Image (cartoon, rainbow, N blue to C red):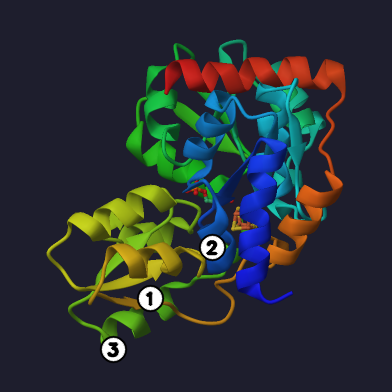
Amino acid sequence: MNSDILKNSISKLKEEKDAIVLAHYYVDGDVQEIADFVGDSYYLSQKALESDNKIIVFCGVHFMAESAKILSPHKTVLMPDSSADCPMAHMVTPKEIKKAREDYDDLAVVCYINSTAQIKALSDVCVTSANAVNIVKNLKEENIFFIPDKNLGQYVASQVPDKNIFSNDGCCPVHNILTKNCINEAIASNPDALVLAHPECSFDILEMADFIGSTTSIIEYVSSSKHNSFIICTEVGILHQLNKEGKNKNFHLFNEQQVCQDMKKITLEKVYNSLVSLEPEIHVNNDISLKAKTALEMMHKLA
Ligand code: 13P
Ligand code: SF4
């Protein structure tokens, strides 16, 4: 089927089956185009919670669909390719959480939403890149074990200096690969460009950035900026929306490695197949789901 036929068929199936399609900015542009809502992790998790459709088709990686299922257990949550997974979600262990809880009495375990349900179930509150600083600032605990992204953890620590914030050794391989050298080269070739960075980048990069924020905040920044040239320190999929919002603006990426291969596993054809077969469906163990829900709901309450 060509992509126009696929898009039409998806749109009919969505209506027939009472399904809503949610897509992250890192999936391919043609998948973003058939989505009912496109956004950052926080926005998508809000939409999953608010929607009254029977079916949610999540075009993103596993932790996103899993979080939607945890927040709305009565809904059918489909993932067009259930092998699309975020490597960082698996970079912290229950043992590390247990050890931190033993080491500190006054401790909050703050878990980036990019984590497995099992890890969320052991945490006090979830956060996303859009709300991590505010949520951590408002926690009563002084010691914060921020998991599983040491880069976002270090960024939050720089914004909330009065707390003792420490992390495990995890990071996003797509963002962590960006080096000071690549940014310096990009600045040398585009001296008028502003550097916009996602807080999953390493702290050296964040120190060079003119703006730091979630995918949505980066897009909003470009839309309202008078500048017309930007060095983009995040995943390539964001360009689809940036090119729409920032017509006549120039965006510079570094290399072919700014690609999240897992996000790219979601294709139009798989979205179509998933709506036809109502598979693969996401299931979460009941006990884990109930505990993880508390941490996710706490995020929605505090954000
Ligand atoms: P946000 O879209 O929430 O900024 O997150 C980026 C990301 O890496 C999602 O996996
Ligand atoms: Fe995970 Fe990084 Fe891909 Fe986001 S971009 S899903 S954090 S690997």
Looking at the image, residue 176 lies above or below residue 190: above
Q: Residue at x 19, y 73 (%)?
A: 228
Distance Cα–Cα, label 1 vs label 2: 12 Å
Q: Which mark is residue 148?
A: none
| Residue position for label 1 | 183
Could you tell me which secondary element the residue under label 2 belongs to? helix
Residue 51 is left or right of residue 266, and the answer is left
Q: Which kind of residue does numbered mark 1 sit on?
A: Ile
Residue carrying label 3: 189
3 or 2: tag closer to the N-terminus: 2
Q: Amino acid at mark 3?
A: Ser
Q: Which element carries disc 1, helix, strand or loop? A: helix
Please state the horizontal and vertical placement of residue 218, each as a whole percent of the image: 34, 55
Q: Is residue 85 visible?
A: yes
> Could you give the CA–CA distance between mark 3 and mark 1, rounded to whole angstroms?
10 Å
Residue at label 2? 175
Q: Residues within 10 Å of mark 1 (few under 14, many from 20)?
A: many
Q: Pointer 2: residues within 10 angstroms few (<14), some, or many (20+)? A: many
Q: At 34% from the left edge and 48% from the top edge, which residue is drawn?
A: 217
